[in-house]
Image: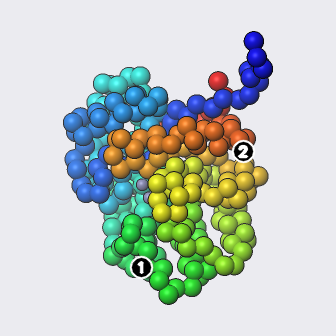
Amino acid sequence: MGADHSSIAHHELFSDYHMHPQGHRVQRYTQELLQPWADSARKKGLRDIALTDHDRYHAGIDFDEIKRLRERNPDLRIRAGIELDNDPVHSPAGRKWIEKHWEDLDFVLGSVHFLERADQMFDSVPDGAAQFEGMNIDEMYADYFRRLRELIATGLVDCLAHLDLIKIHGHRPTADIGALVNETLEFIRARNVAIELSTAGWRKPVKELYPSDPIIALAMEKEIPFTTASDAHSQVQLGENFKRLADKMTGIGVGKVLIFEKHKSVEVPLQL
Ligand SMILES: [Zn+2]
Ligand SMILES: [Zn+2]
């Protein structure tokens, strides 16, 4: 026998807590829509998934259909979730819907997708990049994190999606944003909110995990827990780059993920 590798932690990711079965339009939940997502999850070795369509498509969500999906796929844990945006037009209704269905939901993601423009998500690729042209990037970062804290303050959010989405098109601040990030993470910790490690950043122009390494390190210091997420907009993207993420988590010493049921979280060790 060669070297003994048994002492090296091997991480196997099993949960994906960010996906969009409806894509970018209202599509009523049916078994035809949802079952391919369960099939794909199983194929990729995922055992715990959260459906998190955007709140502006809440009309498509049907809790009875989620229940049927669970019955048809007893080997999977399927969480009823939603991604609450800061959409100035649609999210006021989305917030009301979440409050009304709080008991039916397992998990609420919080996301800042809108800055000054109310009619376009700044993270649209490539169109949203125009919102950064000629702007003071430092001020845009400050504005983004301010909006993030506003969203946390609603008290409706279990976990924050793509924490540093503002970097999506590759715009970097010139000033040190350490204090800004620290203040935001303090607030996250105080409000007992989780943050996701999202592989989606790797397929975007920035080509970097959400959030960045320094933010992950600071979050670890503050003992803020993590979920794992792909932000899949097609079932094919489920668990995308999770092997790469698992290796990264092993390398930096993140050995647990958070899972949710009825907004109650449990930390699960990844080490086999
Ligand atoms: Zn999002
Ligand atoms: Zn999303």
Which residue appears at 48% of the width and 79% of the height?
A: 132
The residue furthest bottom is: 134
Q: Is residue 118 above or below residue 12?
A: below
Q: Is residue 268 left or right of residue 117?
A: right
Give the quadrant of residue 128. bottom left
Residue type at the position of mark 2: Ile
Q: Position of residue 16 (x, y in %)?
A: 48, 40
Helix, strand or loop for disc 2: helix
Residue 28, relative to residue 167: is it above or below? above
Mark 1 neighbour density, 10 Å: few (under 14) some (14–19) many (20 or more): few
Q: Residue furthest front?
A: 2
**Which residue, given by chain and number where applicable, does mark 1 sit on?**
130
- Quadrant placement of the N terminus: top right
Task: Give above or below for 192 relative to 175.
Answer: above
* Disc marking residue 252: 2
Where is residue 249 drawn, in percent x and y?
A: 65, 42
Q: Quadrant of the C terminus?
A: top right
Front-lying residue, 32 or 263 = 32
Distance between mark 1 and mark 2 Cα atoms: 35 Å
